Amino acid sequence: MSQATYNKMWTDAQKDLDIQLQREREEFLQPEKDRVKVFKLLAASYIKYMQIFRNLETAHDQLVHRQKRAVIRQELDGVIGRILEMKKEMVELENSEFHYIDNILEDLKLLPEDIEVPIPRYFIKEKLEVLQQREKILDQILLNAGLQTQKPVKAMAFEEAIKMIQVAERARQGRCRAAFMKQIYLEEKREGQTKLQVQMGPNPDDAATCIQKVWRGYIQRKKTEKMREEEMIFLGMTLPPHLKATSISQMHAGQINALQGEVQERHEEVFIKDKLRETEGLNIKETLQDQIGQCFIECRHIIGKFPDYPTGEAGGSMAILSQKTPEQVAAELAAKKEMALQKKTQKEKKEKEGKEKMKGKKPQKTGKKEEEEGWKMAPSNFLSIMEEGNSQYKAVWQNRDEGWDFLQDHDPELIKEEKREEVEEEIRVQVDELMQQKLENLKLAVDGEKSDKQKKGRKSEKKKKTPLRKKIPEMEEDLTPDRTIDSLYRELVEEGLLIKAKTVNLSDYVGEYSYLGTTLRQVDIEPMPSLADVRQLIALYGILPLGSQTVHEKAPLVKALLLAGPAGVGKKMLVHAICTETGANLFNLSASNIAGKYPGKSGLHMMLHMVLKVAKHLQPSVVWIGDTEKIFSKAVPKAEEKMNPKRLEKILPKFLKALKAQDRVLLVGTTNRPFDANLKPFCKVYQKIILIPRPDYASRFVLWKHIILQNGGAITNLLNISCLAKVSDGFTQGHIVQAVQAVLTELRLLQMTRKPLRTAEFMTSLARQDPVYKEEEETFKVWYTKTPLGKARTRALADSEKAGKGKTKEGKKGKGKN
C-alpha cells in the first residue's frame, strides 16, 4: 500500500480518538450506580481504544515521515496506557482477570480478531542492532564456556557404523557404474546415428521445417509479450516506455537512498542546525544582548543599583528575561493563601475525627458513601498525553498541504522550528558569559563596586556541610562498585543464571476465543477462560509495559506475574514469548538452577544484586522462577533438601521492593502445583495470577490443524480434525505436540504423497499419555478461589445472589398485599 493509504489510516484513527476523548469528558466524569451499565461502558471504550491502537500501530510502522511517526508514537504510548487503565478498572469491577464481551462484539458487528492485542513492532525495530550485537556476545560466551546447546550426537555401535559405511559405499559404486554404462550407451547410439547420416545425407525439408518452427515460435512470443505490455499500460499497471527509463533511474536512486538513509537521517538535522546558526545566529545574539542590557538599566532605575547576574544553575539570563509582572506575583500569592487555608481546614477535620474516636463515636464508613454516589472513573495518567498528541495533530498535520512533499520522509520547516530553540540555548550560554563580564565592568564604572564572587563562593563552600548519608536498603546497596556490567553479564551467563530465550512469538500460542462466556455467566456458571484470553493477558501485563518506558512508568505497575496451570499448557513458552516480543534478557532463578550456586546468605545477596544490576542496566528484563511453589512450599521433600528450594522465600519481597516504576524488570513465576505452597506469602509476591486451563474444543480443533501443518503434514479428507479434537478432550497442548511429532517422523513424511495421513494414526500415540483429569482441574479451581481476587469474586457473587433473593421476596410480598 502507498503512503497515502497509511496517512488516511492515521487520519481515521485521529478522528476516532477525538470522539473517544470527547466521550471520556462527558460520560466518565458522571457517577453511575448500575454496575452492568458501567461494565458495558468500559468494555465499549476498551474495544474502541483497541481499534485505535491497531490503526495507529500500523500507521507508525509503515509511514516513512519521521515527524509524523514521532507524533503517532506519543499517541501510541497514551492509548496503550489508557487500555491498561481500562483493564484495571474492569478487573476491579468484575473481580476477575477474564472478561467475556462477546455480546458487545455482536452488537458492534466486530470479530474477536478485532480486539486481539497487537504487539507494536517498534519494540524490536528501534533496538534491533543492539539486540543482534547482544545475541552475538551471548552466543560467544556460551560457546567459550562450553554451554552452547547443540543437538546430541546419537551413539552408534562399531558394527552398525561398518554396515552403514558399507551400504553407502555400495550405493555410491552402483551409481558410478550406472552413470558409466549410460555414457557408453549414449556414445554408441551417437556413433550409429552419424554413420546413417553419412550414408543417407540430411533431408532439406526437415531442416527447413525445423528452422520455420523456431522462427515462428520466436515471432509469436514477441507479439504476445508486446500485446501483454500494451494491455498492462492500458490498465495502468505499468509505465509507458518513455517513462520507464526514468522509473529505472529512480529505482536505482531509491536503492542508493536506502543505503544512505541512516547517514542522511543523522546529518540532516546537523546541517539544518548549522545553517540556522549561520543565518540567524547574529540576530539572536544581538536581540538577547539588547534585552538583557535593557533589564539591567530598568533594574538600576527601580532599585538604584545593578542586580547580581544569576548563576548557570539558576538559569542564567533566562531567569532575568522570565521575570513575572506584579499582577502575576499577586495571583501566585493569592493561590498560596488559598492552599494554606485548605490545609488548615483539612487539619481541623482530622483533629475533630480524632476527638470523636477518643470519645467512642464511630465515624461513618466511606464505603456506603461510595455506594450511594456510584462508580466513578479513577484519574488517568494518559489522557493528557493523548490530548496533547491530538491537539498537535490538529494544529500541525490536519490541514497541512503536503502536495510538494513527494518523498514523504521529513519536513525541514518543522526541523527548523525544533532546532531554533537549541541554537538559541547555545547562543544564550555564550551571551551569558559576555553579559556577566559587561555587568561587572558597569558596576566598577558606575557604582565603583568590585566583584567579590570568588570570596563569596569560598565562604559558601565552607559553610556548606556535607549531608549525612542515609542508610541504603540491602538490595539497593551496590556490592560490586568496581566491576563493569560486561563482566557481571559474562559471569551470570557462565553460571547459567542468564539464559538464551527461545525465539517464540505470542501469535504461536494458538487458541480460540470463548464464544459462550456471557451466556454461561448469565446462568450463574463461571466459564473456564480460553487460550485467547490468556494470550491477551500476557500481552497486557507482560509485553506492553516492558516494551515502552512511558507506559511502564505511568500505567498500573505489575512487578510480578504468576502463570499457574497443569503441565503442558505452555507456561514456559509464554515466558519465552514475552522475551522475544520485547527483546528482554531472560534470567533463570529456578530452585533447581540456583542449587549449589553462590552458597550462604552473603552469596545469595550477591547473586540477586548482580541479577538486579544487570537487569536494570540492560532493561527490559524478565526474571523467571520455574516451579515457584517450591520456594513457598509447606514442607520440603527429603529428595529436595540438598537443593534448598526455600532460599529465596525471605529475600524475594525485598527484591521486588527494589524495583521502581522506571525499571522495566518483570518477575514471572510458573507452577503446575500452586496448591503445595503457603498461600499468604505466595500471593504477596505475585500480585497478578493467571490461571491457564487445558484447551477447550475450539482451541483443540485449531491446535491440531496448526501443529500438523507446522510439522510438515498435509490435511486431507481422510484426516478428521473434529474427531481428533473430541477425542483429545482433557489433553493439553504439550500432549498434542508430542502425539503429532511421534507420528510425523522423517520416514512418514516421505510416504505422505502416496499414503495420506489418517485419524487412527494419532490415536495410539495420544493414548500413551496421561490426560488432565477432572479432579486435578477442580483442585486448580478451588485453589484459585482462595486467592485474593478469587475471594473477592466469590464474595461479589454471594452478594448479588442475596440481592436477587431480596428482590424476589419483596415482589412476592407486594403481590400478597394486592
Image (cartoon, rainbow, N blue to C red):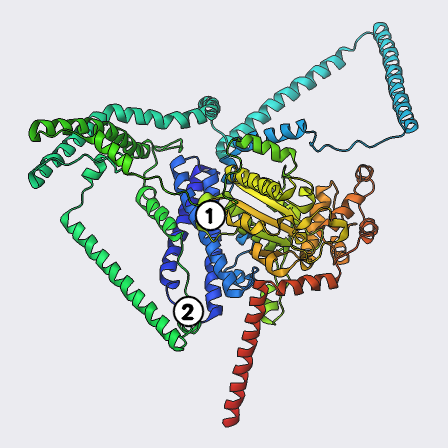
Q: Which mark is residue 32?
A: 2
Q: Which residue is drawn at 76% across and 46% down?
A: 738
Q: How far apart are marks 1 and 2 (CA)?
A: 32 Å
Mark 1, other Cα within 10 Å: few <14 / some 14–19 / many ≥20: some
**How far from the left and from the top, in percent, is residue 71?**
39, 42
**How far from the left and from the top, in percent, is residue 368?**
43, 74
Callout 1: SS: loop
Residue 117 seen anywhere in this rendered image of the structure: no
The residue where tag 1 is placed is 661
Q: Residue 242 carries which label?
A: none
**Left or right of 641, for residue 680:** left
Q: In the rendered structure, which amino acid carries the disc numbered 2?
A: Glu
Of labels 1 and 2, earlier in sequence is 2
Above or below for 368 versus 649: below
**Left or right of 662, for residue 770:** right
Q: Which of marks 1 and 2 is in front?
A: 1
Quadrant in the rendering for residue 530: bottom right
**Left or right of 663, for residue 395:** left
Above or below for 81 versus 711: below
